[in-house]
Amino acid sequence: MTSSSNDAERIYRLWDEALGNKDLEGALALYAPDASIESPLVQHLMQTREGIVRGTDALRVFITRVFQTNPPQRRRFKQGFFSDGRILTWEYPRQAPDGDQMDLVEVMEIEGGLIQRHRVYWGWYALNVLRES
């Protein structure tokens, strides 16, 4: 396993831990200072026209809001990840062992051991949860 593959596995594991523990500082430590997150949730929670936040200060505000507003359908069932060492991706499938969960695909571009760009793609079930909130 190469150094960049180790970074991908480390980020995959630590992101899940931060999400599960609602650990803001742990999550932020995974991002480069000029990193971005792009997701429909950005537009929804930040009340912005575009769905992108950039830089540590904006990431702090956004991730805080994410941790404060997680609906019960936002669970963490997944079955591993794929990475070429630079791009890290995984799916939260709609059908999970204990019922439907928000269906999302996470894609992270990793540079220098940190997340540079983070994109979250939403499935129809997750979008319906967002619309109803």
Image (cartoon, grey):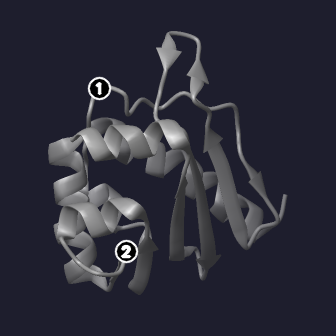
- The local crowd at label 1, few if under 14, some if 14 to 19, many if 20 or more residues have their Cα within 10 Å, is few
Q: Residue at x 43, y 65 (%)?
A: 39
Q: Residue at x 62, y 33 (%)?
A: 93
Q: Secondary structure at mark 1?
A: loop
* Residue 61 placement, left or right of 18: left
Q: Secondary structure at mark 2?
A: loop
The location of residue 28, given as percent across then percent down, is 32, 67
- The local crowd at label 2, few if under 14, some if 14 to 19, many if 20 or more residues have their Cα within 10 Å, is some
Task: Name the quadrant of the C terminus.
Answer: top left
The location of residue 69, given as percent across then percent down, is 18, 44
Residue that protrudes farthest toward the top in the picture: 98
Along the line of sight, the residue nearer the viewer: 5 or 72: 72
Along the line of sight, the residue nearer the viewer: 37 or 30: 37
* Residue 25 placement, left or right of 115: left
Within the image, what quadrant is residue 37 found in? bottom left
Question: Which disc is residue 51 wearing?
Answer: 2
Q: Residue at x 35, y 47 (%)?
A: 18
User: Disc 1 or 2, which lies upstream in sequence?
Assistant: 2
Vertical comparison of 86 with 39: above or below: below
Residue that protrudes farthest toward the bottom in the picture: 34
Closer to viewer: mark 1 or mark 2: 2
* Residue 14 placement, left or right of 94: left
The location of residue 14, given as percent across then percent down, is 47, 49
Vertical comparison of 112 with 123: above or below: below
- Type of amino acid at the residue the image marks with label 2: Gly
- Type of amino acid at the residue the image marks with label 1: Pro
Question: Which disc is residue 72 wearing?
Answer: 1
